[in-house]
Image (spheres, helix red, strand yellow):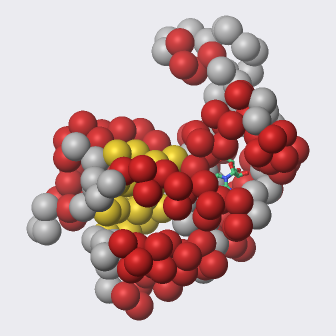
């Protein structure tokens, strides 16, 4: 099974992708995680994308498409969940070509809808490194693109560059929506119902 989770930054795609990994034995492919790993390793690619990511802008399509093509190749036909890809129409078209060449097909695109007004609250991360009552240890890592200006640009990039892929998938008849405002378990159940064909 091949599934795309779509939604604005902060909608909870990563959390739901992890649930699906466990439940269906799929592999989570997060382009954001891949790029952060490149940065942390200090690779040439990581250095190239650093400033773009910190500003909250999208990394050029050709870089992302190469990155994801390589990862999909390495899965050898195993099912996967795309989290944070595609983010532009050219990326969606490239994915189609990639899958067609491999004889694979995209099963579902799930849009997690989130109210604009609540976006900033949901996206809040600890303000001071290492100080966050009740957070898990992974929450102590503050992202460089988590300042108000970058968050605004990321949301704007979603509206202008990513939202146009919704009609692209609607036309194909594979787009479904879930209420991303519901609690994590309820969103998870909505997604499972879709994937189970209900
Ligand atoms: P994320 O963790 O998905 O929010 O991604 C973090 C950042 O990585 C984004 O703000 C972009 O700068 C970059 N990025 C991740 N995925 C993509 C993509 N599919 N296309 C372009 N840029 C991306």
Q: How many marks?
A: 0
- Classify 95 as above or below 15: below
Q: Is residue 68 visible in this depiction of the protein?
A: yes
Seen in the image, is 160 located left or right of residue 11?
right
- Classify 122 as above or below 160: above
Residue sitting at x 34%, y 62%: 3
Name the image quarter holding the C terminus: bottom left
Measured from the top left, where is residue 75 in percent x and y?
A: 36, 50
- The image quarter containing residue 110 is bottom left
Residue sitting at x 69%, y 37%: 38
Measured from the top left, where is residue 148 in percent x and y?
A: 81, 42
Measured from the top left, where is residue 123 in percent x and y?
A: 61, 40
Residue sitting at x 55%, y 66%: 86
The residue nearer to you, when weighing 69 against 20, is 69
Residue sitting at x 71%, y 28%: 41
The residue nearer to you, when weighing 73 against 123, is 73
């Amino acid at each position: 099974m091949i599934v795309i989770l779509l939604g604005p930054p902060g909608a909870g795609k990563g959390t739901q992708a992890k649930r699906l990994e466990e439940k269906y034995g799929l592999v989570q492919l997060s382009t954001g995680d891949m790029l952060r790993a490149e940065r942390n390793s200090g690779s040439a690619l990581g250095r190239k994308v650093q400033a773009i990511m910190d500003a909250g802008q999208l990394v050029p399509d050709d870089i992302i498409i190469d990155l994801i093509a390589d990862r999909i190749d390495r899965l050898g036909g195993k099912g996967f969940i795309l989290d944070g890809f595609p983010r532009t129409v050219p990326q969606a078209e490239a994915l189609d070509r990639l899958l067609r060449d491999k004889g694979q097909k995209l099963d579902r695109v799930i849009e997690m809808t989130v109210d604009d007004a609540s976006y900033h609250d949901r996206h809040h991360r600890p303000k001071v490194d290492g100080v966050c009552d009740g957070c898990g240890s992974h929450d102590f890592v503050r992202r460089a693109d988590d300042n108000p200006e970058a968050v605004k640009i990321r949301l704007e990039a979603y509206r202008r560059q990513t939202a146009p892929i919704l009609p692209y998938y609607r036309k194909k008849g594979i787009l479904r929506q879930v209420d991303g405002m519901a609690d994590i378990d309820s969103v998870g159940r909505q997604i499972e119902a879709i994937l189970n064909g209900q």
